[in-house]
Image (cartoon, coloured by chain):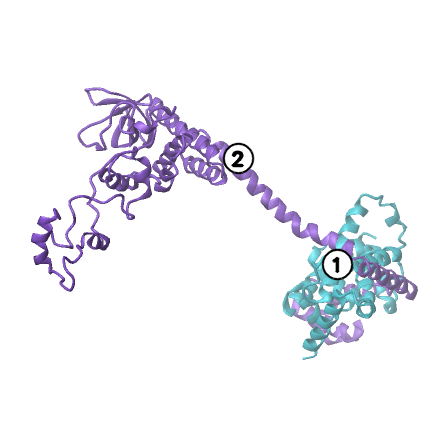
Chain colours: A purple, B cyan
């Protein structure tokens, strides 16, 4: 049997399939007769192994098959019920896994500090919570909570001796002569390279950007956000009032409107004086001896080009000069001019502190 | 060309079946029941079991249409694939039963009759030897000798070349013959 080549057996099986008897096939392969016979007998036995179904069995099967199909066609509810879980179940499972993963990630990130892998997750979740909060009072509470977290994170880093970039907001509690400041309980080292924006003093609210190192925060930038001394309007409020520190800014450009205002009326009918002719007339009538398009020495009341924050943060009675200066500074601090403009009530103080906090955090 | 025409025809039939058209389903049953039954009877001893399993294959065909899970290409390929799975499940259940019923087979002893060559190998011995082949070999032999499917169609059904199927068949028959020869020596 083993001597029969596979190709010979293939040919012999083809002949068997064509209807030749075993003896006829073997006669064509006389050299392989001994080995070929049992193989062909096996093949022949295989051909007779299967049986034909009875007619009755086939009819029964067909009737049951068509009846089941009929039932299926007339019961769309059952069809839908089977189909929906097939589609929905995997989707729900995937969503559940994603949801649980997010919860686990957020929980794990609670104790993260700057420099940790999960710190960005922690901050992103804070942003997410803020974005979901439409109530301004609730939002201010959240911002204050997040500000406290930043302070706690810095303390953790200082305790563990890690060196990481940090940014936090706090009240200056002490400015010592040895350049060691205390901001909200956190020791801050100020040196000649520290960029200080504004004129910080104790009780001012500042943003400190720097690096934790050897138990202190080595400050890179100290930014005065709220100066208690310069905001008398809010001094009686429980939280430090928000005032943007004045910074020198260019004087606003004169507008054409001013030119119209200083245009003198003709002294006599039919005679329109030139600019040069108007000079002596102006002197006689106490008009300024300037050309019509030159900026007058006295600024008019708040210009429409001034940011809205300026007029609201300025105490009543303040003149226009201060307004113009304050405006640009608020933008530099990253403060929201719109928020400041809404700062017409006590509650908004907390909001504004929080606003600064978040903008600082984004840095 | 003939093959392409048949495939196109089967696709039309399949699409109608998906719409649960009674005529299409009846035609599918008429066209394939005997083949499926023969395939199953090649592998199981009892007639009643083969009938039950064949009905089960067609019931699953309806379920597949309802669940939109099958058959993707050909009805024939799907039916024989399902028949194979139904058989596996049957074997699994059977393993938990007693083996006493297998001893009821009576050996055919008419060895000298050249006119009854196939009768010299009793069915039960053949099935036992078949069960020791690989699943793929069993499937191909059942398609070839149970259904009587031509080599070309077997190749399409099992996604192999005709040459591979021929070689697989030859080796399966050789293995079967070796096992049966061993039994006969022992008698």
Q: Chain of mark 2?
A: A
Callout 1 crowding tier (Cα within 10 Å): few <14, some 14–19, many ≥20: many
Report the chain holding disc 1: B
What residue is shown at x 35% (from left), y 35% (from top)? A356
Residue drawn at point x = 19 percent, y = 20 percent: A178
Horizontal side of residue A125 vs A298, given as left or right? right
Q: Which residue is mark 2?
A: A104
A290 or A118, nearer to the observer: A290
What residue do we see at 21% from left, 23% from top?
A: A179
**Regarding mark 1 in the picture, which secondary structure is present there?**
helix
Q: Tell me the residue that label 1 is attached to.
A: B66
When the figure is inspected, residue A35 is found, relative to residue B132, above or below; the finding is below
Question: x and y percent of residue B5 in the render?
Answer: 70, 77
Q: Where does the image place residue A82, in percent across and percent down from the top left? A: 74, 52
A9 relative to A91 in the view: left or right: right
Within the image, what quadrant is residue A267 found in? bottom left
Q: Is residue B170 above or below residue A222?
A: below
Left or right of A353 on screen, residue A220: left
Tell me whether circle 1 and circle 2 mark residues in contact (CB < 8 Å): no
């Amino acid at each position: 049997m083993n001597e029969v080549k596979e190709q010979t057996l293939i040919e012999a099986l083809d002949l068997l399939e064509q209807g030749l008897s075993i003896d006829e096939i073997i006669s064509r392969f006389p050299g392989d007769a001994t080995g070929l016979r049992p193989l062909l007998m096996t093949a022949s036995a295989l051909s007779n192994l299967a049986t034909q179904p009875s007619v009755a069995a086939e009819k029964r099967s067909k009737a049951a098959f068509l009846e089941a199909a009929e039932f299926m066609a007339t019961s769309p509810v059952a069809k839908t019920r089977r189909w929906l879980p097939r589609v929905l179940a995997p989707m729900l499972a995937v969503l559940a896994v994603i949801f649980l993963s997010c919860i686990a990630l957020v929980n794990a990130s609670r104790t993260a500090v700057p420099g940790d892998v999960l710190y960005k997750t922690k901050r992103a979740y804070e942003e997410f919570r803020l974005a979901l909060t439409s109530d301004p009072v609730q939002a201010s509470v959240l911002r204050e909570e997040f500000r406290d977290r930043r302070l706690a994170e810095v303390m953790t880093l200082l305790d563990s001796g890690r060196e990481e970039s940090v940014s936090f907001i706090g009240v200056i509690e002490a400015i010592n002569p040895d350049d060691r400041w205390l901001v909200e309980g956190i020791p801050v080292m100020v040196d000649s390279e520290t960029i200080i924006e504004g004129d910080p003093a104790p009780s001012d609210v500042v943003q400190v950007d720097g690096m934790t190192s050897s138990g202190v925060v080595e400050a890179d930038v100290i930014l005065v956000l709220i100066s208690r001394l310069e905001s008398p309007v809010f001094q009686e409020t429980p939280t430090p009032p928000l005032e943007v520190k004045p910074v020198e800014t260019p004087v606003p450009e004169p507008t054409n409107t001013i030119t119209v205002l200083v245009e003198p009326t003709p002294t006599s009918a039919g005679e329109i004086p030139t600019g040069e002719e108007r000079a002596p007339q102006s002197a006689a009538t106490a008009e300024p001896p300037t050309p019509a398009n030159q900026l007058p020495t006295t600024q008019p009341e708040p210009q429409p080009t001034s940011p809205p924050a300026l007029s609201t943060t300025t105490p009543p009675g303040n003149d226009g000069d201060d307004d113009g200066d304050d405006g640009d500074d608020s933008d530099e601090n990253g403060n929201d001019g719109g928020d400041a403009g809404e700062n017409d009530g006590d509650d908004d103080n907390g909001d504004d502190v929080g606003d600064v906090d978040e903008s600082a955090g984004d840095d | 060309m003939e093959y392409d025409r048949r495939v196109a025809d089967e696709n039309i039939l399949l699409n109608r079946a998906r719409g649960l058209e009674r005529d299409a389903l009846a035609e599918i049953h008429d066209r394939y029941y005997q083949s499926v039954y023969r395939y199953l009877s090649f592998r199981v001893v009892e007639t009643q079991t083969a009938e039950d399993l064949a009905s089960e294959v067609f019931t699953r065909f309806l379920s597949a249409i309802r669940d939109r899970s099958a058959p993707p290409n050909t009805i024939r390929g799907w039916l024989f694939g399902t028949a194979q799975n139904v058989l596996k499940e049957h074997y699994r259940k059977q393993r938990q039963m007693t083996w006493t019923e297998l001893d009821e087979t009576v050996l055919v002893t008419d060895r000298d009759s050249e006119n009854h060559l196939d009768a010299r190998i009793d069915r039960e011995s053949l099935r036992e030897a078949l069960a020791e082949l690989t699943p793929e070999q069993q499937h191909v032999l059942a398609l070839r000798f149970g259904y009587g499917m031509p080599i070309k169609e077997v190749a399409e059904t099992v996604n192999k070349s005709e040459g591979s199927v021929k070689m697989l068949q030859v080796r399966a028959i050789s293995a079967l013959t070796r096992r049966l020869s061993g039994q006969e020596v022992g008698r």
